[in-house]
Image (spheres, grey):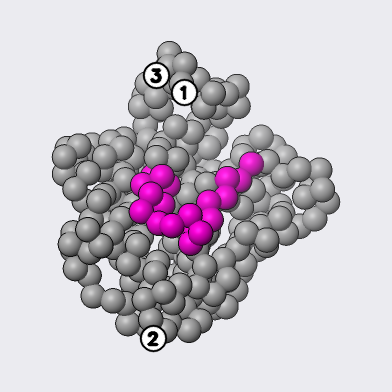
């Protein structure tokens, strides 16, 4: 398989002005779709739950994209779940076990800041699982995601990609800013030192877990203004498409005039 990461055009950018305009319009549309799917704009029985999953290199902009995604939504209508290393209890179970409580039910919405793909990335790169476990886990993830989708979940997956040089620049910016220093950890520097191994792991992940019911959308995240617009507009397109596929008729979009 050709490496999709090499095909990403990291030079893509948007001005701050255009980005803010399009982010604002997308946020209003996301609110419209969220109220519809929750049954708050009229009857929408058993609308599919929505799970949005973010992965990417450290400092790629996952947090900023998630903040823009959720900024226009009522906090009661979306759950953001940061995923860290499994704890001692979770390690006693199958690696997917710990995600069950946070999965969205019908008409619910969950956003994962990292996910079960840590199994194929950090656990693989740090040698916590062997090659056989990596291959088996990839298949189990595909089967798990397929089961979620067939049971009524819309699953949207994003990988935010930045160059090694841009990541270093962002790390250095964080190190100099007292308000952002907490974001930069020893683990971040450790992961950066293993970038080549991570690139191989990401390439394999994309090859083995990109499937029709849970496609990977790759985000050229070198420019944050472009990345945020791409994430929001792609999510809207995939959400609307899946609603239609399941027999729902999304409300008409009224552009930037909705709920202003």
**As rendered, which of 159 and 69 lies closer to the eye?**
69
Residue 9 visible here: no
Front position among marks 2 and 1: 1
Q: Is residue 110 left or right of residue 123?
A: left
Q: Residue at x 64, y 41 (%)?
A: 84
Identify the secondary structure beneath mark 1: loop
Residue that mark 2 sits on? 247
Identify the secondary structure beneath mark 3: helix
| Callout 1 touching callout 3 (CB < 8 Å) | yes
- How far apart in space, not on screen, are marks 2 and 3 (Cα)? 47 Å
Q: Is residue 162 left or right of residue 94?
A: left
Residue 151, image x, y percentages: 57, 78
- How far apart in space, not on screen, are marks 2 and 1 (Cα)? 45 Å
Residue 82 is a magenta residue: yes
Q: Which residues are magenta?
A: 65-84
Residue 184, image x, y percentages: 52, 24
Mark 2, residues whose alpha carbon is within 10 Å: few (<14), some, or many (≥20)? few
Residue 45 visible here: yes
Residue situated furthest top in the rendering: 176
> Where 176 falls versus 241 (above or below)?
above
The answer to which of marks 2 and 1 sits earlier in the sequence is 1
Q: Residue at x 45, y 40 (%)?
A: 63
Identify the secondary structure beneath mark 2: loop
Residue situated furthest front in the rendering: 260
Marker disc for residue 180: 1
The answer to which of marks 2 and 3 sits earlier in the sequence is 3
């Amino acid at each position: 398989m050709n490496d999709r990461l090499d095909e990403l055009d990291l030079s893509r950018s948007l001005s701050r002005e255009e980005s803010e305009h399009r982010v604002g319009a997308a946020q209003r549309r996301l609110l419209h779709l969220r109220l519809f799917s929750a049954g708050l704009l009229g009857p929408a029985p058993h609308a599919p739950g929505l799970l949005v999953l973010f992965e990417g290199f450290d400092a790629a902009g996952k947090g900023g994209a998630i903040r823009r995604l959720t900024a226009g939504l009522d906090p009661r209508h979306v759950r953001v779940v940061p995923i860290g290393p499994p704890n001692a209890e979770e390690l006693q179970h199958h690696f997917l076990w710990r995600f069950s409580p946070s999965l969205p039910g019908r008409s619910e919405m969950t956003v994962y800041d990292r996910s079960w793909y840590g199994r194929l990335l950090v656990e693989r790169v740090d040698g916590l699982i062997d090659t056989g476990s990596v291959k088996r886990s990839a298949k189990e993830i595909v089967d798990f995601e397929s089961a979620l989708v067939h049971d009524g979940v819309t699953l949207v997956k994003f990988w935010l990609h930045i160059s090694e040089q841009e990541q270093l620049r962002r790390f250095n910016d964080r190190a100099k800013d007292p308000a952002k220093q907490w974001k930069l950890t020893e683990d971040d520097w450790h992961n950066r030192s293993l970038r080549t191994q991570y690139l191989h792991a990401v390439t394999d992940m994309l090859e083995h877990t990109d499937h029709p019911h849970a496609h990977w959308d790759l985000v050229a995240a070198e420019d944050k203004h472009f990345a945020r617009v791409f994430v929001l507009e792609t999510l809207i397109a995939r959400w609307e498409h899946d609603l239609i596929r399941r027999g729902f008729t999304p409300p008409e979009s009224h552009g930037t005039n909705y709920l202003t």
